[in-house]
Amino acid sequence: MAEQLSAAQRSKVRRLSQPRDVVEGEDAGELNIIPFLDIIVNVMMFVLATVAVTFTATIDSTPPSLGGRGVRAMAQSNALNLAVFVVNEGFSLKASGGNIATGCASPGPGLAVPKTGNDYDYAGLTECAKKLKEASADFKDETQVTITANPGIDYQTLIRAIDALRRSREGEDLFPDVHFGVPR
Amino acid sequence: MTQQQTIPKKKGASIVHYKAELRRAIRKNAALPEVNFLNITAMLDMMTIILVFLLKGMATSSASIPQSKDMTLPTSIITSEPAQEGTAVVISKTQILVGDDTHPVVMLPSRDSLAQSGIDARYKRNGPNDLYIVPLANALQAARQTDKQIRQAKGLDPNTSEAIVIADTTTPYRLLIEVLFTLGQSEYAKYHLMVLSGGKKP
């Protein structure tokens, strides 16, 4: 038969088995940085709420040369040598075979990609560049394009034209290496 | 423990049994610690690190380029990492700045005037049709000397430098070409056009 504790023993067991409260002095050895951290959190919330984080990128190129031709790497004689002219009425494209006619189907007079209404047809420019690149197997590895624009064309239009020539809607690289030409 | 030593000696259980009961009671109470506060110190430590990282990243990256009415970057679909090497040339709506110098190299006339013949002929080397901007070239050559020494110290090719062109969306092509041409004439063989990434495919 198990031994029974006396009342005094039970009382003693209860008292001694209670978890001891942490004495305040025990924490005094550490620096209390919680108020500081509270301030930091508030500052961080403020920064995140007020600063509009913008991500930037850069388009690499080389200085332009006079005469509408940029500094180009040595191109083969049967290269496409695509040049795009941004004019007020749309995009004019020229290649080794001459001026590209409207519709990008063949050489001929006219603007290759005219404006649609008052807006430039960037999707049309992408399609035209793709069509020209796929016209011959020799053009498959060609990545350079020279862009020239009318003096009044704004920088945003130029960047959009570069984007349109950079890759197709399917994500294939078209002409990512851009050079700038100087209009005569 | 001094308290444990003062064991009641009166009738009751043996000392061995009493101590066993005491140990069991202590274990039972210790097994259920009372959580009366939430310890968020670890989370706050983490947030502090994130804050420092964000502030440092924003201070050193090109994201710190101020966007204002005078200077708005164009958007592009390109998402590559921006180039960090090079002398910064800022073309805003009203002025051109070079490097960290806050004094404008050239004050720009109206956009219509710029679109016609670029910068004023008095800033050009050979009249209004010339592309070479003399004050800009002077500032670039001074920056080029510094950059040349930096490139030598870094073991890079000191024969040419690189430039980061930060231009406003409305900058006319004529002005852009004048600046790029002047860069080329000042031994800057490569430049990076700064854009805001994340635009949609036109």
Image (cartoon, grey):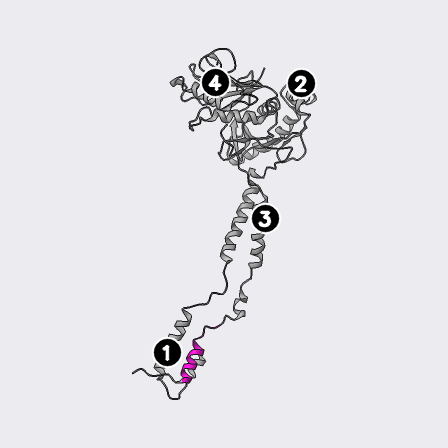
> Which chain is home to disc 2?
B
Which quadrant would residue A173 be assigned to in this image?
top left
* Marks 2 and 1 share the same chain: yes
The residue shown at (65%, 23%) is: B114
Q: Which residue is mark 2?
A: B128
Q: Which residue is mark 3?
A: A46
Tell me if mark 3 has few (under 14), some (14-19) or many (20+) residues whose alpha carbon lies within 10 angstroms of its own.
few
> Which chain is home to disc 3?
A
SS label for mark 4: loop
- For this rendering, which residue is in front, B138 or A43? A43
Q: Which residue is mark 4?
A: A82
Screen quadrant of the C terminus of chain A = top right
SS label for mark 1: helix
Q: Which residue is mark 1?
A: B21
Q: How far apart are labels 3 and 4 at the CA level? A: 50 Å
Tell me if mark 4 has few (under 14), some (14-19) or many (20+) residues whose alpha carbon lies within 10 angstroms of its own.
many
- Do callouts 1 and 3 mark residues in contact (Cβ within 8 Å)? no
* Marks 4 and 2 share the same chain: no
Label 3 vs label 2, nearer the camera: 3
**Residue A97 sits inside the magenta stretch:** no
Magenta segment range?
Answer: A7-20
SS label for mark 3: helix
Q: How far apart are labels 1 and 3 at the CA level? A: 57 Å
